Every structure is written in structure tokens, then in C-alpha cells.
Amino acid sequence: MVYNLFEFLKKVSSSGKIHIPDKPIENNLPFPIALEISVQDYNSFIEKHESKSGYKLEYRKGTVCIVDMCSNEHEAVVDSLSKSFHAHDGTYADYNAPIQVRGTPLHLSPDGVRNEPDVAVFPHKTFVPPPPNPHPGPPPSDIRGNPYARIICEIAVSQDSSDLKTKCRLWKRQTYVRSILGIKLYDPLATRNTQGDRNRAMKAILWRQGAPKQKWHFGTVNKDGTATGCNAPGIANYIITIPVSDVFYDPAIPADPAVPGDTGYTPLPPPPATLMGANFTIDLYTIQQMVLLSQA
């Protein structure tokens, strides 16, 4: 979720609740910029200024913080992940592809705050139609009434690892989100690899509903400077697999006898078995190399 800082400051400047940065922001994140802001005001602002470029904001119990900033590395990871999720599109036109991928579509997160994941993967309406009940459902939807994302990815560059994990665990509280992938890029080091790129530690964590958490350290080096084994494409220990069937998770909802006229929800038939039985594969070496290519 990334927004223009100055638009937000203009919105709240009359309240006297803003904090103007007086030092480099990227070295002091998370950075609070607005205090005593209600969830309602924040959500209203986010909806009106959806997908503006600039800074990545988060709402934290009345305080609005800058938690990360746009960067080449961040966008390189988003692009690489999107290609992995599009790999099963086959001959479908983009607008008919069973698997839809978006950057920063606005969702109501489980804590009631409007949030935009860096990458969201959700089913085409041919297989999972827009929920019959208006947003927020059930079944749950994004704020535009489209099916809620089933796979979510969050990428942190300046944002610290603890904040990233908190954000990912928050998404996991929504059971329709079947897989959550968090990727943390640590600061580049002064040392260089054999290709002349500055060494960098990188970490990926995968949360899946009903499964143990998985973790990979896939930079050229670990945080202590020792080399990792992620030094070529196709190494099994550095490939993440996520079932394609996660995208089409769509359980039936029985009718509620306490609600007059409620008929429940019956899902549509799933996609072909060849698609439902497939896996997304994310080669972390590819992400590593895209980050190295994009960094200063």
C-alpha cells in the first residue's frame, strides 16, 4: 500500500496532528506522521487516494506511520512474483485468465483497517463469482466487490522484519487467504560477489493455512556475511511451491435460519483438474538476481 505523503499531510494538516520529518526517513522507519487519527478517517482517505505512488503507510492504533518507500528492488520483486503467478495462464487472454494477479488492490484487513497487499492473487469470476452479499460479504470481497485475495505477498525493504511478520500474520487471520508470502530485503553490504554485485541478505517466509511456517535465507550471503547455497537457478532448497488450488478456495456457506431469506452460498464448479493439481513455483534465485540487478 503506497501513497503520496504530501496528499496525506494536506488532508490532516489543519488538525495539528502531523509530525514533519526532520531527518532522512528511510533510516528511521517506521516513522509516525499523523497522530490521533480514527480508523474511519484513515479508511476514507485510503479509499479516495487508492494506489498513489510515494510512501507505504500503515495505521497503528490511531497513528499513521511510513513503514517503507518505493524502490527499484521492491518493484523488481513484485514483477518477478507476478510472473510466477501468471505462469499457468496458458493461452487465456489476460481478461479471461483463471488466475488474476494485482498489485495493491484495496482490502479490508482482519483488524478493520483498509490495506493493500503488495501482490494479491485471486480467482477469475468465471470460477468464483463476486460475492452475492455486498462488501464485505460473506463470502469476503475486496472493497470493489471482487473475490478476496487467496494468496498475498508482502515485500519489505526499509520496513523491518518484525513489522513484516506482523503484517503477514494479520492477513493469515482471514481464512480465505490461503497462503501469505513475506519477503525481506536487508541492506546491501560493502562486500561484493564474484559478479561484482554488492552482497545482500534476503529472507522469505511462507505462511499457509493449516501448515507449518517455512523460511528461506536466499541472498548471496546471510546476515552474518557467510555465503548461502542460493547460487544457481533450479536448486530445490530455494524453490517455493504453492498449490494453485489455493486460488480457488471457495467453501459453501450454509443458510442462516436466523436471517430471513438467506439461502447460503453454493460455489461454482472448480477449474479443470489439470489446473487444480498444479503448483506455483517461485525460484528464489530469480528474485535474488532481480534484486541485485535493481539495487544501487
Image (cartoon, helix red, strand yellow):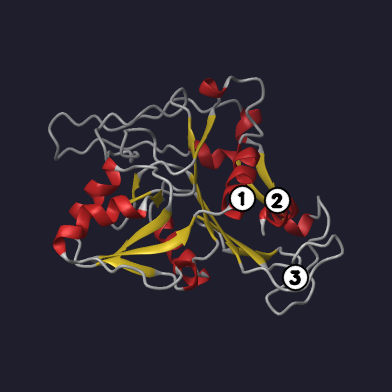
Q: In the rendered structure, which amino acid carries the disc numbered 1?
A: Val
Q: In the rendered structure, which amino acid carries the disc numbered 3?
A: Val
Q: Quadrant of the C terminus?
A: bottom right
> CA separation, marks 1 and 2?
7 Å
Name above or below for residue 26 compared with residue 255. Answer: below
Name above or below for residue 46 compared with residue 199. Answer: above
Can you see residue 38? Answer: no
Can you see residue 182? Answer: yes
Q: Residue at x 41, y 38 (%)?
A: 251
Residue nearer the viewer, 41 or 152 = 41
Q: Residue at x 29, y 58 (%)?
A: 111
Mark 3 lies on residue? 221
> CA separation, marks 3 and 1?
18 Å
Decide which of tag 2 and tag 3 comes sooner along the chain: 3
Residue nearer the viewer, 12 or 185 = 12
Query: Which numbered marker is on residue 77?
Result: 1
> CA separation, marks 2 and 3?
15 Å
Residue 8 percent coordinates (x, y): 28, 53
Mark 2 lies on residue? 290
Helix, strand or loop for disc 2: helix
Left or right of residue 266: residue 82 = right
